[in-house]
Amino acid sequence: MLVITRFTLAALFGFMTISALAADPRAGSWTLVSAQSSLEPADKLSIVSANGTVHVLMTGEAHLDFMAKTDGKQLPVVANPVFDQIQLHRISKKQVEVIEKKNGAIVATIHNALSKDGSELTLTTSRPGHPDQVTVWTRNASAKAGPDPFAGDWTQDVSKTRMKQGNLLTIEATRGDGVRFSSDYSYTAHFDGKAYDLKNSRNDTVQLTQVDSHTVDAVYRRDQQVTQKDRWVVAPDGKTMTLISSGELETGQHFNEKLIFQRAP
């Protein structure tokens, strides 16, 4: 859902020179220290429990619809492109683990944890080769919980981050005014107004513009349509960087994100 290159003092302190504009103020290694995220509309989660069987339905950015028993037995799932088998283990009264498999291989493990008062549900999703994703859900006031404390209707809490904090991104300057960006997706691009290909991204291309010595704008496109706009702002002391991102997912949902990064020592 991330080789430290030094940039000129002019770029760091904001002197508006040609050389400063040629250097990417984001250059260096950064660690995510905080994040805020929202989806419009928010994701919805419904859990219905009866006679030892749980029916889970999620709509929004992700769509899930399956039934399982809490006895840990593996059950088939139909009409789902991501996984075809499911296992549900009850760890305790307030903790459940869901294992999703595809052709016998684990594709995701989802740890469900209820708060002490039962009003908040935290899902931690682990996928091989990917950082964990944490989502927080709040129980709707009108929902009535059954014997299973997880049962009820839930809405994702958009005041909590959808992203695991601690993600690392690295930005290297290349020859000329080029930059190499590496995170959960990557690209090599120049500040020349042209579109450059992305790797491991839901988008196809990125276009970079250096607004000033501390600010970079990025426009992302998929199928030649603008899907996301980012603004990166490096603090005057060069120690922190703020990313403000907005756009539209493949599902048509709008999102707004604000992430704060700290330069790695």
Image: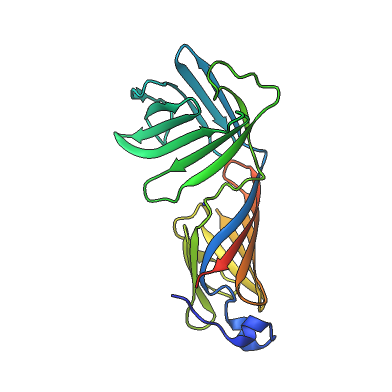
Residue at 50 percent across and 73 percent down: it is: 265
In this figure, what is the number of numbered marks? 0
Residue 225 lies, in percent from the top left, at 61, 54
Residue at 39 percent across and 33 percent down: it is: 99
Evaluate whether residue 51 shows in this view: yes
Towards the viewer: 30 or 208: 30
Q: Residue furthest left?
A: 104
Q: Residue furthest top?
A: 51
Towards the viewer: 265 or 47: 265
Residue 245 lies, in percent from the top left, at 64, 57
When asked about the image quadrant of residue 190, the answer is bottom right
Residue at 49 percent across and 79 percent down: it is: 5
Residue 52 lies, in percent from the top left, at 44, 15
Residue 82 position (above or below residue 185):
above
Q: How is the image coloured?
A: rainbow
Q: Residue furthest front?
A: 116
When asked about the image quadrant of residue 122, the answer is top right
Residue 144 position (above or below residue 176):
above
Residue 143 position (above or below residue 163):
above
Residue 104 lies, in percent from the top left, at 29, 33
Evaluate whether residue 224 shows in this view: no
When asked about the image quadrant of residue 216, the answer is bottom right
